[in-house]
Amino acid sequence: MKLSSLTERNDRDLVLISVFTFFTVTLWVFFEVIKTVKTTTVTPQVTQTIVPLSPTIDFDVLQTIAGKKVY
Amino acid sequence: MAFNYKQEYERYKRYYQSLEPALTKPASRAYTAIIFSFLVISLFSWYAIRPTMQTIFTLKREITDKTDLDKKMEDKISALIEAQAAYQNVEPDLPLIHEALPVNSDAVRAARQLQGLAAETHVAVTHISILTVPLTGDSGTGTQPKSAPDTVLDFPVSLSVSGAYPDVKNFIMGIHNVRRIMHITSMTFSPVRESGAVASGSATPSGTQIKLDLKLEVFYLSSSS
């Protein structure tokens, strides 16, 4: 086999390897970025702290209780 | 042994020289350029672009999260201020809530309520038993799960009363009107046989004595303190 054809075949293989490496790294970086975007930075303790609070008090219940009898 | 580069060069010269015509070919040069370009881009993507992108998107996400957090915190602070005002409004009525749902079992008070109701409705309490009274607030015996803070628990009360039909009816209605929260789980009626009683023609004669067996659940709020 001639040296020039051997070199050309090697070149093609190396191009394929480098292209696959490039795509692998690109996809890896892409998915890492997606993971970073999706992961929240708020801790569970803070999430628990900001649970919404309803400030309304049912006064009707208090009136109903007040209307009941105590012996 | 010292490295003699002249001798080594002479030895491997033919390999170096055979590479030279291959590298001078335009196709090989193009291939080499492409290969190294892809490899360099990959290398920089991994070691430079990836950390930078991660930092950028982490910071952006943090800004979004903190903005959202800030808004929710402000909402909660406003809600707490409103709740404080509402609490101050209802503060005089808080004893009512403690009477309805005390922070410990307070079984004696519950029994007194039932006795008071019986006296008011003119029925005679023949039997009252509180099977298991939890002395501390965190050991419920009823159907509720045990010892979680701010959990409504209950204890069972068994009660027998006897009296005229309207009085027994008033007693049952009165249980729902007692401030202490109670729940009737079962009730059994049976007529009281008295020697020398005169039969009446009415379907629900007011003079007929009825015995009522009640099973109640009396509720209280568990408290670990």
Image: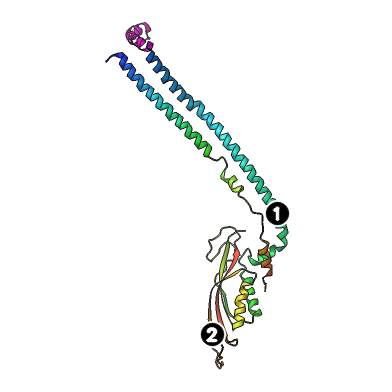
Q: Quadrant of residue B192?
A: bottom right
Q: Could you tell me which chain the residue with mark 2 belongs to?
A: B
Q: Quadrant of residue B209?
A: bottom right
Instruction: Find residue B153 and report its horizontal and vertical position in percent.
Output: 57, 64
Instruction: Find residue B52 and report its horizontal and vertical position in percent.
Output: 54, 29
Q: Is residue B42 above or below residue A68?
A: above
Task: Choose between B179 and B116: the one closer to the eye.
Answer: B179
Q: Secondary structure at mark 1?
A: helix
Segment colored magenta: B4-24
In the rendered image, the quadrant that contains the N terminus of chain B is top left
Give the labeled residue for mark 1: B84
Instruction: Find residue B66 and report its horizontal and vertical position in percent.
Output: 61, 40
Residue B169 showing in the rendered view: yes
Say if the magenta span includes residue A8.
no
Looking at this rendering, what residue extends furthest in the left direction?
A1
- Whole-number angstrom distance, CA of label 1 to CA of label 2: 54 Å
Say if the magenta span includes residue B16.
yes
**Magenta stretch: helix, strand or loop mostly:** helix
Instruction: Find residue B69 and report its horizontal and vertical position in percent.
Output: 62, 43
Left or right position of B146 against B96: left
**Amino acid found under the numbered disc labelled 1:** Gln
Q: Quadrant of residue B59?
A: top right
Picture residue at 56% right of the left edge, 75% below the top: B129
Residue B124 showing in the rendered view: no
Give the labeled residue for mark 2: B191
